Each structure stands twice: as structure tokens, then as C-alpha cells.
Amino acid sequence: MAKVHERVDGRLRRFVDAQRLFFVATAPLAEDGRVNVSPRGIPGTFGMLDETTFAWVDGTGSGSETIAHLRENGRITVMFCAFEGPPNIVRFHGRGRVVTVYDEGYAAMAARFGDLPGARAVIVVDIDRISDACGWGVPLMEYAGEREMLQPYFERRGVEGSADYRRRKNRASIDGLPAFDFDPLKEWSTLEGLGRIRTRLAAQIDGWSTPVSHAVALDGEIGHVNRPGDQHGLPAVVLATVLKHDGSTATLEMTRHQLDEAIGALAPAATCTEVEHPNLAAWRAVRDRHDERGGAISAVFVRDGADPVTSPTDAALRRRW
């Protein structure tokens, strides 16, 4: 039978402290908004702050739904399941708040937990309902160990590289709500800063070599043409990063989501007013036309003008040089 508790102490506290994994559920207010459920569980990065407050260090990831929903309405549920030993399910219903790496109280809060490369915030849950229930429907499973990829990945990227990743992946929820958009844009406001960003992003791509030309097209119709000799290094590397491409001569299909990601990743460059940003304008125009009439989005890269033509769109790009 389910039981409601006033605080997390005694047997309940021992159960929570012993867990290696928990789940977080949040949702936007919109009727058609997408409900989100996420697993959390890197050892040493979560736990009780007191008898009615739970928190975890939130690492940089491929999305930022939890943060977006908490910023909008604060509602959150945390759930623990017993995968070994006596069956049990514990749920915390409450209000969540986001303490980002840029907030004054972050250092003191994060110091209560282990170091997490790429950390972007501490999520604090003020619990207003604590309950446990039988977990007979949860299977028994044997713990085999932790996956050892995420932390080294962001350790290699470093502080600036992790922020670059968040600007590309974390600024908005999948429903378009503001998410982790706290990373400063000062570096993006100067040509020197844009050059550093370009170099940093390029270093993350194996075999990268800046193409002499590239473009984004809808049904073969090209917007802005980057001609050989033009200064278009940052848009090229942003586009390649999104498409996981090394800049070699190719014509690649793009999804609407990938185009959105590329636009979001390049958008901060607009804070640099020393130059125009024709690629950003062209990508947005392609997105608008696609939303109006549909069609196939593609990206063309030409590393060397002597390379074989890869598609009719590639041929059209070269003709416009």
C-alpha cells in the first residue's frame, strides 16, 4: 500500500542514499506540450540536502527539457525504484529551481557533491509530498557498473567547449521554451572572438579542413553562396558540427530539426556587428520556405573545386561562383 511521509528520514533516507539511479518527470503548461522523463544517476552527484530537499548536479546533455519546464512552472516529480533487495518505489512531488554555474550560490551548492565535468547547474527540489509504494512490478536487475563516456567527453571539451555545446543544444526545449540560455555571448560579439570559436569547434571534428564553399538549399534552390576565397569559416564549421561531417566534398540531406540546430548554434554570432551574417539569414529563409511548402533540405560542401561534383545542387553551387 502507498504511504505518505512527512520527511525523508530513517528507512526512507537509507533507501534514497543507497540508490544509483532516479527518474525525473516534468511538463510544460501548454495542453499540447511534451511531457519529459529523464534518468539521472552519476555517483556522487545527487542526494538529500535536508529532510525535505533533494538536489543533483545537472550535467550538460543533448537536451534541456527539465530546466525549461522548471523555469516555466516549477513542477517536478522525482522517482526512485528498488532494482535489488526488497521492492520499493519512492516519489518526491515538489517544486524545482535551477541554480546555474553562473549564479552566486552555485559554488557552495555544487561543493556538496562530486565534481562533474560539463556541469551546467544544480537542480534543487523543495519536496511537498513524499510517498513510497510497493515495487512488485519493478524487475530485479544486477548492477554491472557505470558507463565511462560522458564525463571524459566534457572534460576534453573543457569549460568553453561545454558552453559551445550548450549554445547549440540547450538554449530551448523541444517545444520552444527558453531552456539553458545563460551562457554568456561576449566572445561572440567580436571578430577575434568568432575566430576563437571557429578554431575551438573545428578542433572537435576529426579530419576537418575548411571547405572552399558550402551552402544550404531547399529542393536544390540555394540561398546564399559562399564563394571560394570568402570568409565563411564559422558557418561552415557550425553546419558540419550539426551534420557530423568533416568538411569533405559532399551533398548531405538535412532534417528540419538539424536546420533549426544549425540556426540556433550560429545565431549568437549576430551580436558581432562588425560584419554581416548572410548565412544565418539564408538558413532562416530556407526554414521559412520549408515551413510554407515543405520540400527537401540539403547541405553542400566543396572542399576543393577540382573534386567531382556530388549532385545537381553541388553543380548549381559551382556555377554561381
Image (tube, rainbow, N blue to C red):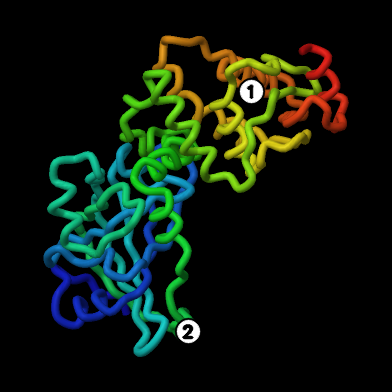
Q: Nearer the viewer, residue 290 or 87?
A: 290
Q: Secondary structure at mark 1?
A: helix
Q: Secondary structure at mark 2?
A: loop
- Horizontally, residue 248 falls left or right of residue 25, namely right
Using the image, determine if residue 303 lies above or below residue 125.
above
* Residue drawn at x 62%, y 21% as measured from the top left: 283
* Residue drawn at x 79%, y 25% as measured from the top left: 305
- Horizontally, residue 209 falls left or right of residue 76, namely right
Residue 199 position in % (x across, y down):
49, 34
* Residue drawn at x 56%, y 32% as measured from the top left: 238
- Horizontally, residue 19 falls left or right of residue 308, namely left
Using the image, determine if residue 241 lies above or below residue 299.
below
Residue 220 position in % (x across, y down):
80, 22
Residue 227 position in % (x across, y down):
70, 16
Q: Residues within 10 Å of mark 1 (few under 14, many from 20)?
A: many
Using the image, determine if residue 261 lies above or below residue 282.
below
Label 2 amino acid?
Met
Dot placed on the residue nearer the N-terminal end, 1 or 2: 2
Per the image, the residue denoted by label 2 is 141
- Horizontally, residue 37 falls left or right of residue 118, namely right
* Residue drawn at x 24%, y 76% as measured from the top left: 17
Residue 118 visible, this angle: yes
